[in-house]
Amino acid sequence: MYCRKCYANLKQTAEFNRCGRCGRAFDPGNPKTYLSRPFPGNWKIARQILWTTIIGVMAAYVVATFQMASLGAGGH
Amino acid sequence: MGDTAPISPLGYFTPSPQQWKYTEDAAAKRWRYWRIVYRIGLGGLFVIIAWCLGPNWINFGQFSKPTMNDLVRIVQRDCVPVVRAMKEYHRDVGRWPDRIEDLTPKYLTDRPRPAISVHDGQFMFFSKGERIFYEFTGSGEDWFVEGGFLNGPIPVPPVTISPSTRPATQPG
């Protein structure tokens, strides 16, 4: 059992039903409230990759605009 | 340690060092290492999209920066017909065309792309952020490119035309 927020081992504080490091509550009887490994879950990974791609594409438009502007200002 | 968990008024568990001390075993350290690798991977993905692939795709329509081979295809497809028409006009009329309209429809049946400019005997084409031009002067006749990514001669042979079979006349 690992905390979904800070990935701390919850077995050490299972009696409190809260993460000892960040205080996030969990239910030992409900696997959805904790992680089976101290690593982001598949859905979280997919979400983070999606957001990284979306923000990357937005940044790419800014970079592309600056590249073309600098080429234009390069003087022809 | 008491029987009840020490919960603060805000609802947070606040253990004292005597109640609980978090210890990280070897497996946890290994997983922490993989989380760092994962975050570096996300950062790398962002940099690749934002700095390399994305701008190239937006500006040039391809994932890599333009190369001379890309320009060779563009020159052969879009530029050679116009320069050939300019040289034929010069051969027949005795002077270089002032504008693209001088070439159509007699020397150039299809109107060239808007990025092509013919002005006062000069040919110019802006493509993929580069300026492509043709040097008409004598032995140095050749294709050239100037721009932020590519500079120098383009490996396309100079445009040649057949000699005139009719007397030079003014069009119109």
Image (cartoon, coloured by chain):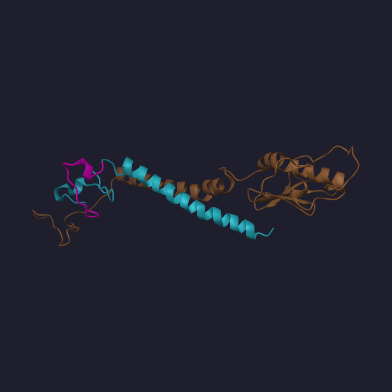
Chain colours: A cyan, B brown
Going 55% across and 55% down the picture, which residue do you hit?
A: A65
Residue B3 horizontal side relative to residue B58, left or right: left
Side of B49 relative to B14 (left or right): right
Residue occupying the far front of the picture: B172
Q: Position of residue A8 (x, y in %)?
A: 26, 49
Residue farthest right in this picture: B167
What stretch of residues is rendered in magenta?
A: A20-35
Q: Residue at x 21, y 55 (%)?
A: A23
Find out whether residue B90 is within the magenta segment. Answer: no
Q: Position of residue B70 (x, y in %)?
A: 65, 41
Q: Is residue B87 left or right of residue B150?
A: right
Q: Residue B81 or A32: which is nearer the viewer?
A: B81
Query: x, y (%) of residue B92?
Result: 86, 44
**The one of A39 and B80 positioned closer to us in this rendering:** B80
Total count of labels: 0
Q: Is residue B89 left or right of residue A18?
A: right
Decide whether residue A25 is among the magenta residues.
yes
The quarter of the rendered structure image containing the N terminus of chain B is bottom left
Q: Would residue B38 be seen by someone viewing this image from the given angle? A: no
Residue A12 seen by the camera = yes
Residue shown at 42% from the left, 48% from the top? A52
x, y percentage for residue B49?
Answer: 49, 47
In this orientation, which residue lies closer to the viewer: A14 or B81? B81
The majority secondary structure of the magenta stretch comes to loop
Q: For the view shown, which residue lies furthest in the bottom direction?
A: B9
